[in-house]
Each structure stands twice: as structure tokens, then as C-alpha cells.
Image (spheres, rainbow, N blue to C red):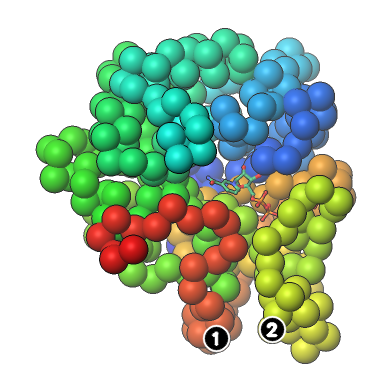
Amino acid sequence: MSNERGRDLAPDVKIPYLGFGTYLIPDGEAAAAVYEAIRAGYRHIDTAEFYRNEAGVGEGIRRAVADGLVSRGDLFVTTKLWPGNAAWGQTPKTTETTIASLDASLDRLGLDQVDLYLIHAPFDREQRLAQWRGLVALKEQKKARAIGVSNFDIGHLKELEAAGLPQPQANQIELHPWSQKPRLVGYLAERGIVAIAYSSLVPLSTWRSAPGHDSAKTDAMKSDSERADSPFKALAKKYGVSEAQVVLRWGIQQGYPVLPKSTNPARLRQNADIFSFRIDDGDMAAIAKLDRGDGVAWSVGDPTKAA
Ligand SMILES: NC(=O)c1ccc[n+]([C@@H]2O[C@H](COP(=O)([O-])OP(=O)(O)OC[C@H]3O[C@@H](n4cnc5c(N)ncnc54)[C@H](OP(=O)(O)O)[C@@H]3O)[C@@H](O)[C@H]2O)c1
């Protein structure tokens, strides 16, 4: 890729590479954070029913539009269906309640349509298919311009294909130099499904270090993040940027839209500055060797792999 700001998601839908993540931003702070992000140049906002901040996100968008910073058409807004999981004592969503869920999200957001609607995670097989049918209907109703999934592995995607359903247009997954998922990413690329990267900043020592923001990083990962001879610190020095910019730039050079979250205005601006430098091929090859496997986000497992 060049310094392009976005890539095709569907024939008539382009997704900006730079997105603003909103997980762990409380509803009461989301409007100010989203407004600030839009002011800093973000045109892609990622939220979810599960984050309980859609109302605040919508308020931030409305303020930005009212102040003339952007029009709705300049923005790419993603939200996600919380599918419900019987194993956690929740009622799994059906096709009908999936459709009702996006209506409720749109009400909270104050929007007529989202640009991308995702199933947040795959739980049991019957739900996945029923929910995906709901997303297909929502796209036909034009309540979502594009539809996709999140945290789906190859087996989950194959199930949709085997059921004769349209394939997702995106899969939002944990992707960063420590979790590169080459097999899954290769599978997505072969089918033209866009991989969207979340938790890009896991290799940094500051990742979810605030009280209550459980990082789920192992002690070994935490100490590797802090090492003075960390490869990301060396690359940051070489390119005259921060470690955050290095790992985000790695993502977009791989072709992945990224979703950095920050409620710190200086970091939020820094994270948006990822189009003014390029990691050279030698350094990209060196980063390719840093893969450690599955990552730290919760995982529901691949149904094609033995339990
Ligand atoms: N689909 C899914 O299952 C899923 C799962 C996880 C995340 N996501 C999405 O992806 C987004 C991003 O993932 P994430 O929230 O896990 O984390 P992230 O964006 O990878 O990292 C955020 C953490 O890094 C810190 N940080 C941000 N910018 C920094 C900088 N320039 N220098 C140093 N530290 C910095 C933040 O602290 P401060 O806020 O204090 O700056 C926060 O602790 C989420 O917000 C959400 O929208 C989706």
C-alpha cells in the first residue's frame, strides 16, 4: 500500500485505515472523546452494543456535524451485535432479535444507518447462522452498508460458506506484531474479506495499564514491553516516531484498518499521524519474525480444531 487513507471494503464502500477505538471509554466520556478524535482527523469510529457507549458516541458525532467539522457522509461508523452466549447465562440472539438489536443501536447512536455491522464473536453454531442471516437482512434493508464478523476463525467462516450464505465483508480480529495470525489472514485475503486490526498497541507497556483495564498480558509480555532493547523502541528511534506509531503503521502497511483507542488528547493525535512515514521492507521482514501466536484477547476457539 501507499499512503492511501482507505481501502475498498465492498464495491461501493471504502473503509478508512485510521479508526478510533472506543472500548473502555465510559458512555459519559465518549461524546468528548469522539468529538476530539474527529477534530484530530479520524473519520472512522468503532463502537459496540457491548461497550455501552453508543449513546455517547452518537452524541460526539452529532456535535461534530453540528459544528461543521464533518458531515455524516464523511464518517465511517461501525457497531457490533452482542450475540449473547448461553454458556454465560445469556439468551442467544435469534435472527429477529439480531434485527431488533441493530434498530436499538441505531436509536442510541442517533443514526439511520451504520457503515459496518459486525457479529462481535462466534458462539454456538445455531446462533451464528441465525445471526448472520439477520445481518444479511439488515444489509438488504440498508441499515448497514456493509456487514461482517469479529473474532471468527477459519472454521466459523467455513460454516457460513457451507450454509450457502453470503460471505462477510470484514473480520475484526486481534492483530499486531505479536499476534500476526498468518493462516487466518491468508484465508481472508484469498476470499477478499478485509481484516480489521484491533488491540494494535498490545506490545506497548502502556496498553490497558490504567486501573480496572485488565490487560490480560502475561508477565513475560509485560517485561518484554518494558525492555530498553525492545525492537519497537529501536524502530521508533530510527523513524523518529513513537512505538505506538510504529505498530499502527505496521498494521496499515499490512493492509489492515487499525482502531487505536486513547482518551489522552496528545496520544490520540499522535496515533493519527501514521501516514507521514513508511517502515522499510527490511524492517517489515524483521517484524514478521516477532509473531507469538494467538494474542491476548479472549478467544472462542476454532470449531474445526479439536477441543
Ligand atoms: N472486536 C473485538 O472483540 C475487539 C476487542 C478489543 C478491541 N476492539 C476495538 O479495538 C479498539 C482498540 O483496541 P484496545 O482498546 O484493545 O486497545 P489499543 O487501542 O490497542 O490500546 C489502547 C491502550 O493503549 C494506550 N495508548 C493509546 N495510545 C497510546 C500511545 N500513543 N502511547 C502509549 N499508550 C497509548 C491507551 O491508554 P490511554 O487511553 O490512557 O491513552 C490504552 O491503554 C477498541 O477500543 C475497540 O474499538 C475490538
The answer to whether the residues at label 2 and label 1 have Cβ atoms under 8 Å apart is yes
Q: Is residue 151 left or right of residue 32?
A: left
**Corner quadrant of residue 298:** bottom right
Residue 297 appears in the rendering: yes
- Residue located 59% across and 32% down the image: 50
Q: Nearer the viewer, residue 134 or 242?
A: 134
Q: Nearer the viewer, residue 83 or 244?
A: 83
Residue 209 is marked as none
**Corner quadrant of residue 165:** top left
Q: What residue did someone put label 1 on?
A: 286
Q: Secondary structure at mark 2?
A: helix
Q: Nearer the viewer, residue 26 or 39?
A: 26
Density class for disc 2 (Cα within 10 Å; few <14, some 14-19, many ≥20) is: some
Q: Is residue 127 left or right of residue 280?
A: left
Q: For the residue marked with disc 2, what is the amino acid?
A: Pro
Total number of numbered labels? 2
Give the mark, 2 or 1, whose residue is nearer the N terminus.
Answer: 2
Density class for disc 1 (Cα within 10 Å; few <14, some 14-19, many ≥20) is: few
CB at disc 1 and ligand 1 closer than 8 Å: no
CB at disc 2 and ligand 1 closer than 8 Å: no
Cα gap from disc 2 to disc 1, whole angstroms: 9 Å
Where does residue 215 sit, x and y in percent of width and height? 72, 58
Q: What residue did someone put label 2 on?
A: 231
